Amino acid sequence: MLNRIWIAFILLGFAAAVAQTLQGDLDVFTRVLTGLFDTARTGFDISLGLVGVMSLWLGIMKIGERGGLIQVFGRAMAPFFRRIFPDIPPGHPAGGSIVMNASANMLGLDNAATPLGLKAMRELQEINPHKDTASNPMIMFLVLNTAGITLIPTSVIAIRQSIALKQGLVGFNAADIFLPTLLGTFVSFCAGLIVVAAWQRINLFCRPVLGFFAGFAALMGGLYAWLNGMPPERMAQMIGLLGSGLIVSLIVLFVAVAAWRRVDVYESFVDGAKEGFGVAVQIIPYLIAMLAAISVFRTTGCMDYLIDGIRTLVIALGMNADFVPALPVGLMKTLSGSGARGLMVDVMSTYGVDSFQGKLAAIIQGSTETTFYVLAVYFGSVNITRTRYAVACGLIADAVGLVGAILIGYAFYH
């Protein structure tokens, strides 16, 4: 599937560039070539930047593994994971790594989530009978990762606050999109879980899965009750404290428990950190390949053509088209996180950070994920070349999540 998508991006982009050249745009191929070189450099920089973070987190995870806490986390979530990951053996360390990755994603801590996710993929590859083909647990993990629940969209809130100051808004609550974003990302998560479960014929109507959803609903209500009514500055401080405090506390817990069990903590960290460089380097060709195809599709204007077509269709159907200016954020998010962030800022700057379009762009940015980036990086880290139905399920979850975010935006702000 990735092969077909990659080819389609290149060929469609080339066709669009040829059409623009025939219409008199003689600089289009220069822009395409410049974009290719820029994205190649960006892909390398991203991978190189991962070396330090990967080394840090893989070292910490090794401490947690040898200290036994990773296994404890895995056992705590075992009833739920046994249902949605039936092919993972009980007690396998992949379960604990998946829990840690999900926790980091829920707190919006991308720098922590990525290395934890890559570690989970390496552990899932150990039990994969076909090393070049994505296994069922890998596909479930990646789709849930790309559609993962984000409790706190920290970066989106920070960007909104910064833009509000530039626009001279007084008393602006940058965190007012907290609950809509949480609902939007929950819709995406449910869609991803249901579509993969249907494909793999997993029964979700069981006590552990229903209990998970009930627990999440209770957690969502508790967070809303806690944060609701706080001044924007205070809410931002508490959100930052919650995310960073939990991660730092977890690191300290890993070290303390490992030391109490007489594990050589320093050597454990070094052993885990050594894996970081190899993983980061292995990602480079896969990431550059995907970024290059996305660059061609974007710089030739194919994304703009797609948006214009959707706007025309929406208006022709007699529907309200106020959401269309924010739609590129959702479509771009599947391709590029930084590109979607730039589009979000553009919408907020054009329409106002407190406008319907500005709020909707923030909800979409906070409740969707960079599907192609995640698939390219995670599968590339373990040399998976046959992705089976992972891309299709990921895109279905993205589409449902995007529609859900738009409907939630209308319900809250329109």
Image (tube, rainbow, N blue to C red):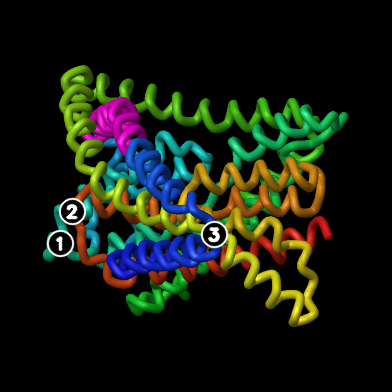
Numbered range of the magenta stretch: 44-67
Q: Amino acid at mark 1?
A: Asp
Q: Nearer the viewer, mark 3 or mark 2?
A: 3
Query: Which residue in the structure is indicated by mark 2?
Result: 383
Judge the density around disc 3: few (<14), some (14-19), many (≥20) Cα neighbours within 10 Å. Answer: few
Q: Give the camera-side residue of 244 and 115.
A: 115
Residue 145 visible to the viewer: no
Give the secondary structure at mark 1.
Answer: loop
Number of callouts:
3
Q: From the image, tell me which residue sits under label 3.
A: 24
* Residue that carries the numbered disc 1 in the rendered image: 132
User: Marks 3 and 2, how far apart in space?
Assistant: 43 Å
User: Is residue 98 in view?
Assistant: yes
Query: Marks 3 and 1: CB-CB under 8 Å?
Result: no
Q: Residues within 10 Å of mark 1 (few under 14, many from 20)?
A: some
Q: Earlier in the sequence, mark 3 or mark 1?
A: 3
Indicate whether 327 appears above or below 40. Answer: below
Callout 2–callout 1 Cβ contact below 8 Å: yes
* Horizontal and vertical percent position of residue 332: 53, 55
Callout 2, which amino acid?
Asn
* Residue depicted at x 52% and y 26%: 245
Q: Tell me the SS state at disc 2.
A: loop
- Outermost residue on the bottom side: it is 317
State left or right for residue 51 relative to residue 394: left
Vertical order, 188 against 77 (above or below) = below
